[in-house]
Image (cartoon, grey):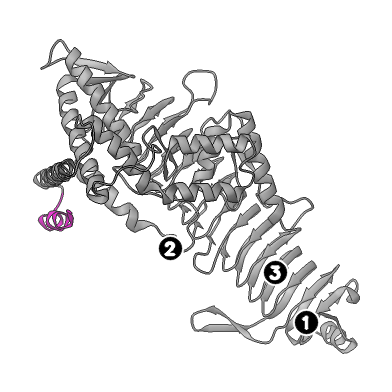
Amino acid sequence: MRSLTVDEISILERNGCRADDWTGINVAEDFSPEYVRNVDFYGEVTLGVFDKSITMEEGFSRHSGISRAVLRDVTIGDNCLIENIGNYISRYDIGEECIIANVGTMTTTEGATFGQGNAVAVLNEAGDPNVIIYDGLTSQMASFMMAHSAEPQVWQGLQQMANRYIADRRPERGTIGYRVKIVNTSEIVNTVIDDDCEINGATCLSDVTLKGSPEANVYVGHDVICENSIVQTGSSILDGAKIDNCFIGEACHIGRGFSAESSVFFANSYMDNGESCAAFCGPFSVSHHKASLLIGVETSFYNAGSATNYSNHAYKMGPMHYGTLRRGSKTASGAHLLMPATIAPFSMCMGKIQSHPDTSLLPFSYVIADGNTTRLAPGCNLATVGTYRDIMKWPKRDKRPAGGRRSIVNTQWLSPYVMQYVAGGRKLLEQMCSNAADEENGETCHQGCTIRVSSARKGISYYDMALRMFLGDAAAQMGDKLPTSTIGTGEWADLSGLLAPKSEIDQMASDISNGTIGDIEAMERRFADIHLHYAEYLWNYAYSLALDYYSLDTITSDDIDMMVNNGNEAHAQWLSRIRKDAEKEYRMGDVTEQALADFLATLQ
């Protein structure tokens, strides 16, 4: 860089430019003042060259340059187009080939954090913060933080790791990356905007980091207010959405006036119209409708029906209650859950559920409000068209670039995590049936739910189907290979997309406490290693489960053949029941014959 020449200063002044001190202006060696007009300079300003046109939209280009702007302590890269700045741009480093037009104010204040390091209280709205947000946060890390925030040594270690990560990467002032476009926007304060991001018509971005990339940029649209938040690659915030103290993960969509406060969203979550508060929305969490409120709830692979509502006031002590809808669960239109509540994987909730149920051991169930009673039909959601469509669509709908996915999203549906509940639920239902005095019309209660004995017997058959499919598939994949360890034979956890033996997660917590793990990168490597060994850990679990389920002392090649055959038969039975479910809907007159035929053709 060099100082301006006397001739260049004269040309700039003839172009309507002013400076409080021309010696504070430095320019690129090949700088030409021709395309700098009506600009006021304050403090130290560095300018690149303006020697080519940049594309505004397809078929329309304009020459780069600066006009009608006030610049204070800024650096501007080569071939930017900056014009019509209503107030000023202050303390920003702007990359090459950016378009900044019709913007009110862009400024960085002293001590800006750019949204990094905010501590969010998810689930318990009235509780202490339990997730620290930073631009590299993954769904696994957030889930781990949430699960261990009440353990002082672990939480302190996590805070220290996050703080070091942020300190190593925090810029001294606002930065605008390469080929960024910011137009028709009122205010940008303390905001970092990465390469190829676009902001068009936003109202305000304050204390925000946008992590874009050439493969997956971030788009912020009209009337958006985004404060104290981080937005990761491939995400969009549109149509008057209001975001405060939130983390928006990879390839998420927030739009149509959705309002989010103190919430986190990960990997392909899609939110329109409604609102959230203190929500932990894991991968593929979806809410499309007005009057839907996600508050104090943890979800993943979830779909909210219209007017879904959660109550985090159990009585009068404040909004301190929360609950979990485990992966694959849904809520029907008008569903209302009074927290606390825990809903098992792949369950459907209907009506106003007031009994604070814990259905953990009974996955694939219908949970239905019947007045003040909550009725549960175990297992029947296993073989429905809806469940089939869900498990088939998730792997195909991941919009994140294949080479740049930070959060781990395992879409396996019959996994050890789910099967531990299926196996436990089957034993629970058998015990219920054996204790029932009236096998025909009798009812039994479990964790706030009423279950008919006849439904329990059907549930056993559904769980048998799932167990045989799972064991058959595992046997077909691994053959008569013996397990290499006991890792995975115990309890499993779902860290918002990462399916992992709980023993491995517990070991990570212990390693943080004793200092073995000391940085974010080591945590992410450990998560990746667990995911890499998923098939091995699955077989360890499946082998142990098969010994118990089939009452075997060891597993021979003949046993493997038996398991595979049973799995194939169960799979055929599963598809047959799904086919009947689709035909039932057709007979109701709700779908056309062609729609039915198209769906049946997809059955695998």
Proximity of marks 2 and 3: CB atoms separated by less than 8 Å: no
57 above or below 575? below
Magenta segment, prevailing SS (helix, strand or loop): helix
Q: Was residue 298 drawn as part of the magenta stretch in this picture?
A: no
Horizontal and vertical percent position of residue 242: 55, 48
SS for dot 1: loop
Which amino acid type corresponds to the residue marked 2 in the rendered image?
Ala
Determine if residue 2 is in view.
Answer: yes
Relative to the observer, which residue lies in front, 596 or 62? Answer: 596
The residue range painted magenta reads: 591-604
C-alpha span from label 2 to label 1: 38 Å
Judged left or right of residue 66, residue 520 is left
Q: Residues within 10 Å of mark 2 (few under 14, many from 20)?
A: few
Q: Rounded to the nearest whole Å, what is the CA distance between mark 2 and mark 3?
A: 29 Å
Q: What x and y, as percent, mark residue 155?
A: 62, 34
Image quadrant containing the N terminus: bottom right
Name which residue lies at 55% across and 22% down. 318
- First-in-chain label (2 vs 1): 1
| Residue identifier under label 2 | 402
Q: In the structure shown, which secondary structural element does the residue marked by tag 3 occupy? A: strand
Which dot, 2 or 1, sits closer to the camera? 2
Read off the residue under disc 1: 28
* Amino acid tagged 3: Ile
Q: Quadrant of residue 441?
A: top left
**How far apart are the alpha carbons under marks 1 and 3?**
14 Å
Q: Residues within 10 Å of mark 3 (few under 14, many from 20)?
A: many
